[in-house]
Image: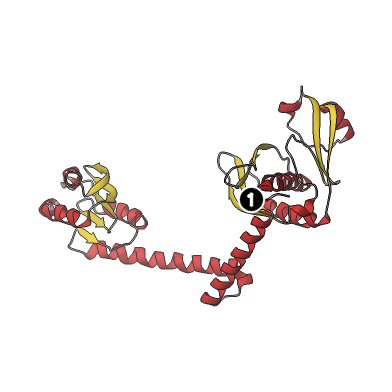
Amino acid sequence: MAENDNGYVLHSAEHMFARSLQNLGINVKVIKADTFRADGKAFLLLQGKIPSTRLFEAEINVNAVIPQNLKTTIETFDDIDAATKRYPNLRFNEERLKDTKNIRLVKIGDFDVCACKNKHVENTSEIEAFVIIGLSHLGGETEIEFKAGRDAINYLLSNNDDVLELGQQNNFNPKEIKKAYNKLLKDLDQTNQEIEKTFLQLLKNSENKFIEVGDLSLSRFYKTMNNFAKSNPDRSVILMSSSQLIAIKGASNDSDFKAIGERLREKKAFVGDVRSDYINGKILDYDEAKLVLAEFSSLII
């Protein structure tokens, strides 16, 4: 098979994956199968939200069937009724084929039979491997990105090497990467909680209403800042990193943040949301932004 025929490999793998899901008792309705893209990527869009655990079960099943060297054969029928009479388990889109004549079926051994007009591999061994590389559940649908053939093998080998390297660098058994990752998340959550407590204490004790925090992402502090402003309605706080600025003032505070924001924009130092009680956006010129805040320091309470 020619190198540029990978679309056939992907499409045959998609057929096997859909059948594997059906064999797990899932009512599979393919909305779109995109396996002949110029960029070589493959996507499958399915109706409904299918749990990732079942998708991975089907992935394992596909890889168990691939080496069975199942042959692909083609059959044609006068209409869909004749086809379903011969193959009651036939997969097809009823809306597209209900009035169609000369129905073309693609059979993959005794594993799958599906109405399809596209070309396929001659034998499942040509698929070599199948791997899911992306999942999303948006709008009540399931979108799957996958690889097959040599691309799938290379992807798995690359991921395996990365996991081995991470395990060596961070002292964990590569087989327990999920356990190590969950522990990392737990430790990170505890660290973030401590950072939030320290930051809140800084707000309470600091006489400076303008606080610089280097290169940190400020989004993590927004909730604490907002709660602080509600609890201290006469106060205001401005937090700025090298790339972002957030300013929030309490309800009874007389500071005019809109004037500050407009001055920042005038100096081309900032772009973002500006209101009388709130500023949030991107810093374009850090040094200029500091000068503007210093200019308004007497107005910031």
Location of residue 9 with respect to 240 vertically, above or below = above
Q: From the viewer's perspective, is 290 left or right of 134?
A: left
Rendered position, 80 above or below 144: above
Residue at the (24%, 61%) spot, across then down? 212
Check the image and name the residue furthest to the top: 99
Q: Residue at x 78, y 54 (%)?
A: 125
The colour mode here is secondary structure
Q: Horizontal and vertical percent for residue 117?
A: 74, 34
53 up-or-down from 160: above or below: above
Q: Is residue 242 above or below residue 161?
A: above
| Residue extending furthest toward the right | 86
Q: Count the numbered circles shown.
A: 1
Residue 301 image offset from top left, x and y in percent: 15, 53
User: Is residue 199 in sight in this rendering?
Assistant: yes
Q: Amino acid at mark 1?
A: Phe
Q: Quadrant of residue 33?
A: top right
Q: Residue at x 54, y 71 (%)?
A: 166
- The residue beneath circle 1 is 146
Residue 250 position in % (x across, y down): 23, 49
Q: To which quarter of the image does residue 8 belong?
A: top right
Taking depth in this image into account, of 245 and 187 the one nearest to the observer is 245
**Few, some or many residues within 10 Å of mark 1 (<14, 14–19, 20+):** many
Left or right, 288 with reference to 22: left
Confirm whether residue 47 shows in the render.
no
State the residue in front, 229 or 103: 103
Q: At 45% across and 64% down in the image, what residue appears? A: 189
